[in-house]
Image: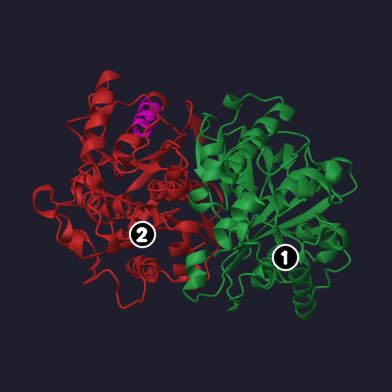
Chain colours: A green, B red
Amino acid sequence: MKKIGKQTITFENPPSILETASIVGPKEANGPLAKYFDKILEDEFWGEKTWEKAETKIVRETSHAVLGKANLAANQIDYCFSGDLLNQSIASSFGLRDSNIPLFGIFGACSTFVEALSLASIFAESTGSNNLLCCTSSHFCSAEKQFRFPLELGNQRTPSAQWTVTGSGAAIVSKTGNGPFITHITPGKIVDMGIKDASNMGAAMAPAALDTLITHFEDTGRNPSYYDGIFTGDLGYIGKDILIDLAKKNGYNISSVYNDCGVLIFDKEKQDTHSGGSGCACIATVFSGYIFNQLKAKKLKKVLLIATGALTNATTAQQGESIPGIAHAISIEL
Amino acid sequence: MKKIGKQTITFENPPSILETASIVGPKEANGPLAKYFDKILEDEFWGEKTWEKAETKIVRETSHAVLGKANLAANQIDYCFSGDLLNQSIASSFGLRDSNIPLFGIFGACSTFVEALSLASIFAESTGSNNLLCCTSSHFCSAEKQFRFPLELGNQRTPSAQWTVTGSGAAIVSKTGNGPFITHITPGKIVDMGIKDASNMGAAMAPAALDTLITHFEDTGRNPSYYDGIFTGDLGYIGKDILIDLAKKNGYNISSVYNDCGVLIFDKEKQDTHSGGSGCACIATVFSGYIFNQLKAKKLKKVLLIATGALTNATTAQQGESIPGIAHAISIEL
């Protein structure tokens, strides 16, 4: 492993993504990617009494599912990297409470999944670990309650608002395996362009995505045409357009290979999610479901995955702060 | 670097802790460790309008301070690892917003500081990074407001309650340097023995500290007498006694070399903090101030640092959940 350029780390023995799993809620099951998810819930509670407990159960069951699919026992996992949007990452902590796996709790808002894959890759190549578990989640109802308005109020959502994905995605990163391989990571820095509208996260996060995108290209000497798929996490329709424009102004035309997981997961015409999906589970489920499937089927061979996070909370919004964005990128190749 | 035993990683070229810095509030300045901190605040606001903004400023200034003491510019730091107790780690995100350093946000409640040092050590040895910044914070007023009761209510605190440390500790971990060196890390797993009293965090976290302590000894073949100092993060008086008892029952007599940072930071007789200090800043400031000083002065030569975290929040407490604990250990040697 070595550092190249400003922020990128490249691997000599690229770690392999051994297996993925995903569980999603009923709204995601009505979207265009339904067939790629491992399990679909009939309602947002899954038999639990609260949304937080439901999200916790989703984390627990998704981590069980990925172990099952990889035919691994929990004691074959060296370390776990996990986080979510709930205060103090309780879905992860309670979901993995009984796992008996050493845990690195992480937080990058909706960028957490790629942060997990990045750290897991470093552990796989360097620490002598064989298998690392990465798992993140979000839940529409718990996120609305915590970040915006309780659903019971029936507030109207603005057109720029995004819909937090209910679900969890998990992946196992291994020292050995047949790929797809994580070949580079480009961890991002915080970028804050002063956006204060908590219902326009795409605009707040797009500049961070741009910063990481450009840094990745500069550090690696690559350009958009190197990849057959560039996916951001949850910029949604508005943020996606902003990123395409900003990239073009900086000399990178990404439009032919680029899409956003928040755009892909819901049907724009039929599902009324306004600017698309968001949440830690957005890129986690779309990657663990759809993108990983396309890689295994060799329909995608070189993917740049850029997860985007808004490092904000309800208190900072009330105190008049703007919304800092961050984006972490990894490149995944066959 | 290689993995030994169940959970421990040991380094071939142990990374060096180049420098530390600490800023604390007025109550900490009245405690027995006052002279070891770099800066002491006159009040809990430090000229800001809210406690959250004050904590943010503490993070920003502590990270500036450690760079200054190490004579490093921000662009000489490869990556930063940071987290805190506020919802969505906003003190870290806003405090480091203008740093221009790629950020891995992490969360291990009050164990976050040692989680940061652990990840930084791995990056220092393996990724080609030269310098890594670790920084965590907590603030008595923002923590009480968020986890327990608003201070304005004037609630009486129970005897088992601990006092969240106001402050921040930061360290720079480097590939090269003259030490002290991080020689081993033992990341912990979640342990939940069913404690539900949010005013008795020491009891909730002690079993996790025990688990990591025993695992560290088993993985390394060491025993308590190997170290001249074993420090837990914030078990306080009650948790400290529990850990000594539990360790003894498991065949390890730690009492002659062991203390807790939450016990050390306040004066039991004069300061009325009940069971002692707590918070992400407890071990962060006590290490960055007192323990690092003792290592540099060669008064301590072999230290085991075990940071303890309670992975809980106000919602889980209201929903009747118990308090999962976690503890991460690193061994630091001259």
User: Do we see residue B21 in this rendering?
Assistant: no
Residue appearing at x 29%, y 44% in the figure: B234
Q: Which residues are magenta?
A: B207-217
**Mark 2 vs mark 1: same chain?**
no
Q: Is residue A107 magenta?
A: no
Q: Indicate the position of residue A53 as horizontal and vertical percent values.
A: 57, 40
Per the model, the C-alpha gap separating discs 2 and 1 is 33 Å
Q: Disc 1 on helix, strand or loop?
A: loop
Which residue, given by chain and number where applicable, does mark 1 sit on? A235
Q: Indicate the position of residue B271 as horizontal and vertical percent values.
A: 13, 54
Q: Main secondary structure of the magenta part?
A: helix
Which residue, given by chain and number where applicable, does mark 2 sit on? B145
Q: Is residue A287 above or below residue A214?
A: above
Chain for disc number 1: A
Q: State the residue lying farthest toward the front.
A: A153
Task: Decide if residue B74 is on the left or right side of residue B295.
Answer: right
Q: Is residue B213 magenta?
A: yes
Q: Is residue B175 above or below residue A198?
A: above
Q: Indicate the position of residue B59 as horizontal and vertical percent values.
A: 38, 66
